Image (cartoon, helix red, strand yellow):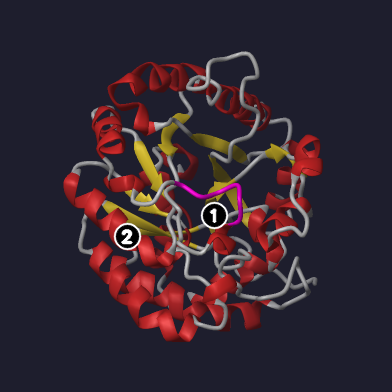
Amino acid sequence: MTEAILEPDLPIIDPHHHLWDLRPMLPAFPEPRHPFLDAIVGAAYYTFDQLHADVSSGHNVVGTVFMECGAFYRADASDEMKVVGEVEFVNGVAAQFASGLYGPLRACASIVGHADLTLGSKVGPVLDALEAAGNGRFCGIRHQGAWDADPDVLGAPFHAPEGLYGSDAFRSGFGEFASRGLTFDAWVLEPQIGDVTDLAKAFPDQKIVIDHCGTPLNIASYHGKLHENFDRWRSSIHALAECPNVSVKLGGLAMAFCGMPEHGPAQGVGSETLAAMWRPYIETCIEAFGTDRAMFESNYPVDRWGASYPVLWNAFKRITSGHSADEKAALYAGNAARFYGIEELLT
């Protein structure tokens, strides 16, 4: 679907996208595929050219933050050090954009990698290696904790151990990590938002951002229950927002997990329809966290399931049409720039 770009001059820093090449792994994906796998198979190859095409498709994207996704790990490294390969690869993509050959956009200006925090105190050398590989761009990690008792919710690739964020091993590694002034991205599912709240209270000086509005669920045993579970989600979001060290990413709702829309990928749903679906979640998050601790994200290419890149950002802009210019500047760029340490992109 093609739409005119709304507010084309509004600066955007997209604080959450991936890069990957899944083509070698496609034969291993089980049949029938989980809806999430169907979504990402549609974007099985997503690196410099594909990212450049999306971020240059009309909106004023001035910079981006790469989010770890288990891609380009080192084949010849130890298990704990394999993750360094992802940051090495993304740093090269960032250097391509930083060359200026492709215009002023600075994609992957900050890089969020992964380290296994259940290594406890032994995670230190991994974090050192990630910082070295990032050449000044590495800013933090994501260690996802998504789990559900229904295995069909997430599918085989994604289940973290139940209660990961509260485990002794994880907390030990988190303590080592928290001493370094890095950022932490938390991905959990809606019933687990309290796990992030507990973690934030245990480490009140650590900057944490919860991804994807806390991932409300409309899949498997949760299908058709968005309305039924909304009050529980809203209560959890407000409780989390009471932690001043936590921010929220506004997006991810087009994922197959969330089912807004239910059918994909990119079935031509317009931004007005998407804005109506997403508005209760986006507005609740902004109400809870304020306009200084919330940031819009594309979650691309995962959210291609429900929306093209231009339509996705149009939907967000429709939701915030009543906000002031200063509030929009914060929600679309300023908060992400401050959180991930790339304020220079806005000067």
Q: Which mark is residue 292?
A: 2
Say which residue appears at 56% left-offset and 58% top-offset: 154
User: As rendered, which of 190 and 200 lies closer to the eye?
Assistant: 190
SS label for mark 2: loop
Magenta region = 155-160
User: As rendered, which of 275 and 85 lies closer to the eye?
Assistant: 85
User: Relative to 204, is 219 above or below?
Assistant: below
Quadrant of the rendered structure where residue 266 is? bottom right
User: Relative to 176, is 306 above or below?
Assistant: below
User: As rendered, which of 301 and 6 lies closer to the eye?
Assistant: 301
Is residue 218 visible in the rendered image? The answer is no
Residue type highlighted by circle 2: Asp
Quarter of the figure with the N terminus: bottom right
User: As rendered, which of 305 and 322 lies closer to the eye?
Assistant: 305
110 with respect to 99 (left or right): left
How far from the left and from the top, in percent, is residue 116? 42, 31
Between the residue at mark 2 and the residue at mark 1, the CA separation in whole angstroms equals 15 Å
Residue type highlighted by circle 1: Ile
How far from the left and from the top, in percent, is residue 81? 50, 19
| Disc 2: CA contacts within 10 A as few (<14), some (14-19) or many (>=20) | some
Q: Look at the image and say whether residue 2 sits in the magenta stretch.
A: no
Say which residue appears at 77% left-offset and 60% top-offset: 32
Which residue, given by chain and number where applicable, does mark 1 sit on?
12
